[in-house]
Image (spheres, helix red, strand yellow):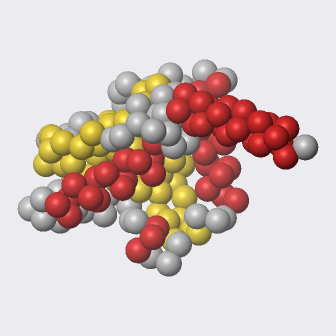
C-alpha cells in the first residue's frame, strides 16, 4: 500500500507542477526603467478592504464587460495605494483598458486616463493573470530597492493576454 500511495502522490505532484508551469508559475518577471504608457481605463472605483466582497464584484464585472463585448480591450487596474502599507485598505480603479477615450461606456463605468511620459519601472511577465501580479510587484520592489529608487504609490497593471501581465509604477523625482 505504501508504494501505491507514493506512486499516486508522485503522479499528482507531477500533474500539479506541470499545471503550475503551464500557468507561468516558474516564469520570472523582467523589470526595466521606461517612460510610462498612456492608458485609458474604463471601470469602477473601489475603496475598502481587500477582503471586502465589493472588490471581487468589481473584478467580476470587468470580466463580464469583456465577455459580453460591452467593451473591447483587456483587463486593467489602477491602484492608488499599496494595501500592504495601509492595514489592508485599498483604493483602486478596476476595469478594462480600452483603445481610446471615444468608446461608449457601460452605464456603471467611468473613464480614467493614465498619463504618458513619466519615468517609471515597468515589469513584464509571461504568466497567467492570477499569478502575474505577485511576481511583478515583488520584482519591481526588489529592483527599486537594489537601484535605490523611490516609487510613487500609483500602480497600473494590465493583462494583454491570459498569460501576460504588465505593471508600471512611476519613480519619484
Dividing the picture into quadrants, the one containing residue 7 is top right
Give the left or right position of residue 76, taking residue 106 as reference.
left
Q: Toward the viewer: 17 or 78?
A: 17
Residue at position x 22%, y 55% in the image: 143
The quarter in which the C terminus is drawn is bottom left
Query: Residue at position x 36%, y 31% from top?
Result: 101
- Residue lying at the far left in this picture: please name it: 173
- Residue at 85% x, 38% y: name it: 4
| Outermost residue to the bottom | 87
Please indicate whether residue 147 sits to the left or right of residue 93 in the image.
left
Residue 108 in which image quadrant = top right
Q: Judge by depth and name the residue closer to the eye, 110 or 99.
A: 99
Q: Is residue 141 left or right of residue 85?
A: left
Residue 5 at x, y = what percent? 83, 43
Q: Is any part of residue 21 visible from this angle?
A: yes
Query: Can I make out residue 111 in this image?
Result: no
Q: How far from the left and from the top, in percent, is residue 57?
A: 67, 50
Is 164 above or below relative to 56?
above
Count the marks.
0
Q: Nearer the viewer, residue 59 or 46?
A: 59
Q: Is residue 31 above or below residue 154?
A: above
Point out residue 123 in the picture as x, y percentages from the top left corner.
Answer: 29, 42
The residue lying toward the viewer, choosing from 69 and 87, is 87
Q: Where's residue 48, x and y in %?
A: 57, 68
Q: In which quadrant will I find the N terminus? A: top right
Amino acid at each position: 500500500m505504501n508504494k501505491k500511495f507514493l506512486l499516486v502522490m508522485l503522479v499528482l505532484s507531477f500533474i500539479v507542477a506541470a499545471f503550475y508551469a503551464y500557468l507561468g508559475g516558474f516564469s520570472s518577471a523582467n523589470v526595466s526603467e521606461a517612460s510610462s504608457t498612456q492608458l485609458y481605463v474604463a471601470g469602477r472605483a473601489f475603496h475598502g478592504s481587500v477582503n471586502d466582497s465589493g472588490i471581487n464584484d468589481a473584478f467580476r464585472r470587468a470580466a463580464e464587460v469583456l465577455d459580453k463585448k460591452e467593451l473591447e480591450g483587456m483587463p486593467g487596474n489602477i491602484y492608488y495605494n499599496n494595501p500592504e502599507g495601509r492595514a489592508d485598505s485599498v483604493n483602486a480603479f478596476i476595469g478594462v483598458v480600452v483603445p481610446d477615450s471615444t468608446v461608449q461606456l457601460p452605464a456603471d463605468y467611468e473613464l480614467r486616463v493614465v498619463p504618458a511620459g513619466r519615468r517609471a519601472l515597468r515589469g513584464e511577465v509571461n504568466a497567467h493573470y492570477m499569478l502575474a501580479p505577485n511576481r511583478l510587484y515583488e520584482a519591481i520592489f526588489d529592483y527599486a530597492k537594489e537601484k535605490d529608487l523611490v516609487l510613487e504609490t500609483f500602480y497600473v497593471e494590465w493583462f494583454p493576454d491570459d498569460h501576460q501581465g504588465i505593471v508600471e509604477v512611476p519613480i519619484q523625482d
